[in-house]
Amino acid sequence: MKKALLGALVVVTALLIALFVFPGRGDPPPYPFVHTRQSTSDPFEYMSAAGCQWDIDVYVSTIAQVHGDPYYFVSESALRNAADGLKRRIAGQGADSIQRIDCYFHLQELAAVIQDEHTSIVVPSGWRQFFPSVFPLEVRVIGDRFYVERDLSGGGIPRFSELSSINGRPMSEMLAIVTPFLNNTLRHYKMVSLEEDLDFWLQAYLRQPPPWSVRYRDRGRVLTATVDGITRDEYTEGRAEEDLYSTYDIAVNGETVPVLDIPRFMYPDKAAYEAFMDDFFGTHRDEQYLVIDLRRNPGGDGRWGFYVLDYLTDTDYETVKRFAHKVSEHYLQFTHHIILSYYHEQRVPRLLWHLPLYRWMDYYWKEEATKLLDADIGTHVELGGDLWDRDDKKVRFNGKVFLLTSHYTNSAAVVFAAVFKHHGLGLVIGRETGGRESFSSDPIFVELPNSTLLAKIPVAILTLPGNSPDRGVMPGIEVQYSIEDYEQERDVDLEAVKELIRTEQETT
């Protein structure tokens, strides 16, 4: 009897060890909608023309099912008509096959019809190896004109000379060709996208490899130069800017004003970011003025911004007017994936993964997952509405705050700017943000069946506090730059801040 009990105890112990000592082993749950290694994709490989047409239909159908708000700027019939037009264009070429990269451009043109920055076709990272040499001129678009901000090749094309043409194609024509593919809503943010991806459009779409014949205007002279490509590493190194949060001072009437520069709202070390912000506001809590610079900030995680906003108020505050997720079969699968990934991360035994443990686990998706999994297909689940629970341990900064924004300010940085402006936490100075006050967010990625390209599709509607949902956050004082300002390297935004402080000091 004792031997039998001992044997049963050994078996039970072995099961418990298998269940709890070695939980969560093995590979993490695979992403449900990606089945191909995108990094190995060949852009010039041929696929069937019919397959690309089929992908267009699949894309339109998936958008209708998954996208949180696909018909905000375009009707469903207009999107369908655009898709049919693209399929007719492919058929009109009379070829049985098409290169994958050409299918990409057809699909991206369709994505751009929706006019939403989070709706796009992803360019596979592996495609870069097929374009090893990069166009070396970093450009800035002002109005409809292209200016050379930097010649990264060292070839000597002067800074802020006006770029007239490349290989005989006027820049105005290039602008007209590329614009239909840019999926941003606001024109100024489309130009930001074009500035960043000019090399891609030049080589991948226009099929113009190096060297390039460049025509430009400098000091009244029209000149021509041959521009060779540079390596991608040289290009990346040449464009690299310090993107770590930092602080510096500006002088106004003999006094210093601290400037907090936050180029992103996500970094590898969250604890270090929070410690830096704690130290900054602890050091400067009694200052009369403060400048927060988000002009280079493309976004990240909004909660990183809220960590800073907590120092600018002493009450809980509204961060969104509406945050609603559209429920679809795809999004339910994605929600299950998030839950299983969390189980894997927390080393929950796989035998328990079928249980709804997420309902009792203290993590970000707990309440959201419960609501989503209980909802009907095609409905929107409202997840916003609660005030942000401010950290009461933080001591409020009581001085005057100036927030700098620009056309490059986007996503989570737009959230910061909208909340800052709505709650009157200070004065916004600069230019309209790149992102809108109301936009689609929280994208998932779905592989299309024939091209194997990834469609980036946002599932949520995010409406920020404010009165201009179709525009970006508008500054209280708008500052515009001329080409002369760039040439002279004037920081016109900070000059505006200094003038406001001087005026206030002289009148008090």
Image (cartoon, rainbow, N blue to C red):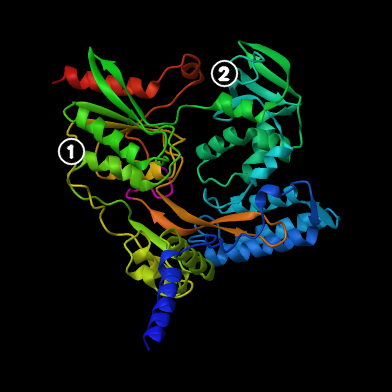
Residue 193 drawn at (x, y percent): 56, 38
Give the mark nearest the N terminus, 2 or 1: 2
Question: Please, which residue is most extreme toward the bottom here?
Answer: 1
Q: Which mark is residue 396?
A: 1
Q: Mark 2 — residue? A: 160
Q: Which residue appears at 73% of the width and 47% of the height?
A: 101
For the residue pair 151 and 482, the one nearer the viewer reads as 151
Which range is magenta? 465-473
Q: Is residue 129 left or right of residue 372?
A: right
Camera-nearest label, 2 or 1: 1
Question: Split into 4 quadrants, where in the image is the N terminus?
Answer: bottom left
* Depicted 95 relative to depicted 195: above or below: below
For the residue pair 489 and 42, the one nearer the viewer reads as 42
Residue 81 drawn at (x, y percent): 66, 61
Q: Is residue 213 visible?
A: yes
Amino acid on which disc 1 is placed: Arg
Residue 126 drawn at (x, y percent): 67, 44
